[in-house]
Amino acid sequence: MPYINYDKQEIAFKIVYFGPGMSGKTTNLIKIHEILDPQKCSEMVVLDTEEERTLFFDFLPFDLGSICGFSVRFNMYTVPGQVQYEASRKLILDGADGVVFVADSHPSKREENLLSYQMMTENFVSHGFDPVTYPLVLQFNKRDLDQVMNISEMNASLNKGGHKTFEAVALKGQGVIETIKEVSKQIVTRFEI
Amino acid sequence: MQVHHNAKEALDKLVNDSECITALLISREGVSIEESGNTGYLNTTALAALIAGMFTATREVARMVGEEHFSILLQQGTNRHIHISLINETVMMVIIFEDYQRIGKVRYEAKKASEVIANIMQPEPEASVEKLNVAGFREYALNLIDRIFDKPQG
Ligand SMILES: Nc1nc2c(ncn2[C@@H]2O[C@H](COP(=O)(O)OP(=O)(O)O)[C@@H](O)[C@H]2O)c(=O)[nH]1
Ligand SMILES: [Mg+2]
């Protein structure tokens, strides 16, 4: 359920980038910020930098424009990857209208991806999200690495729900826009009052 | 949830009476609902998102020590200080002020304004819900998403 203010005619949807630490969540937001019309993205807040991995999110607001008299915005957040922040991860999914799961394609990250994915689905359950209809897109990132897992293998482990997936090289901006576009459309399609 | 115009008036009065620099109402989702006082120096969009995040983290800390929530958060800086309080389940009030000597006054005015604003906030009346045509909204939004996200990639 998005935030709706009838008085000011505003609607804000919340999109959360979930995934293990270092999978490329922050990079996704940085690239969206770079690629899209700068007038539509206001300032980005990056808290989860290489030096400060303990802090709890990045934030990027994106103004879609005016629809039926309402100004519509997507607020994008990332969650920290570290397992010890389970509590804040859960809280950040609070009120999320859709989620992008960013997986790392390197074979050594198989376990971490799975652990994070399981944590996400547990959080879905605790928030009462229906895992089948809830807007969710999977991004298999870092396809540029020398060693990557097969897409079929990644699907088998992370995509039992048959959600839409995108291959990405977030660092080069590849697959980033396709991903955000898809999750936005799923969110809007499901939008009700 | 509907935030009445009077919430803005209550916020203006708070700024005036407490002599703070800025006062804001922020939703739990991290959206700035109302602003009063000087906001020119502030990125209120980012501030709202960060404070909401801070508050959720603090709520979890409260639970760890056996509290439902902490109703007031105070951040003391060198020159500027922030007083954050809960209006209700979904709305927070943020006050930015300079003279720390005035903390008592800020706290007192915050409490007064909180009560007024909590009373003003009403469930959404039926009439304004009808203002938004959901099917039309979806169709237009989907088109807009196509246009915006297809463009930058050529
Ligand atoms: N090779 C490669 N590295 C990437 C890619 N995307 C992100 N990275 C790198 O992976 C590291 C972690 O990225 P970051 O976005 O901070 O991950 P986060 O912890 O999920 O926010 C950084 O050094 C990025 O430059 C990619 O597509 N390919
Ligand atoms: Mg990050």
Image: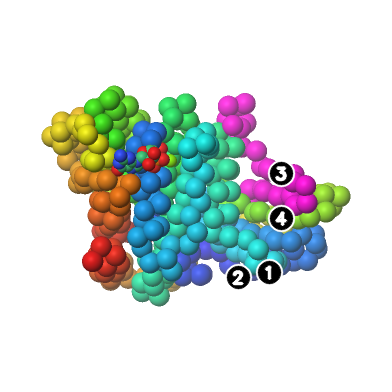
Q: Are marks 2 and 4 on the same chain?
A: yes
Question: In the picture, residue A107 is in which quadrant?
Answer: top left
Q: Position of residue A131 (x, y in %)?
A: 26, 40
The structure residue drawn at horizontal position 25% and vertical position 46%, both measured from the top left corner, is A168
Numbered disc 3: secondary structure? strand
Amino acid type shown at disc 3: Leu
Marks 1 & 2, CB-CB < 8 Å contact: yes
Residue A101 in view: no
Q: To which residue does mark 4 refer?
A: B96
Point out the tag, 3 or 1, that comes first from the N-terminus. Answer: 1
Q: Is residue A192 a member of the stretch shown in magenta?
A: no
**Residue named by callout 3:** B74
Q: Chain of mark 4?
A: B
- Circle 4 residues within 10 Å: few <14, some 14–19, many ≥20: many
Q: What x and y, as percent, mark residue A22?
A: 38, 35
Chain under disc 3: B
Label 2 CB sits under 8 Å from any ligand 2 atom: no
User: Is B77 one of the magenta-colored residues?
Assistant: yes
Q: Are marks 2 and 3 in contact (CB under 8 Å)?
A: no
Earlier residue among tags 1 and 4: 1
Residues drawn in magenta:
B61-87
Pick whichever of labels 4 and 3 is earlier in the sequence: 3
**Same chain assignment for discs 4 and 3:** yes
Q: Amino acid at mark 4?
A: Ile
Question: Which residue was labeled with disc 1?
Answer: B9
Question: Mark 2 or 3 closer to N-term?
Answer: 2
Label 2 vs 4, first from the N-terminus: 2
Look at label 2 and name its amino acid.
His
- Distance from Cα at disc 4 to Cα at disc 3: 10 Å
The quarter holding residue A63 reads bottom left
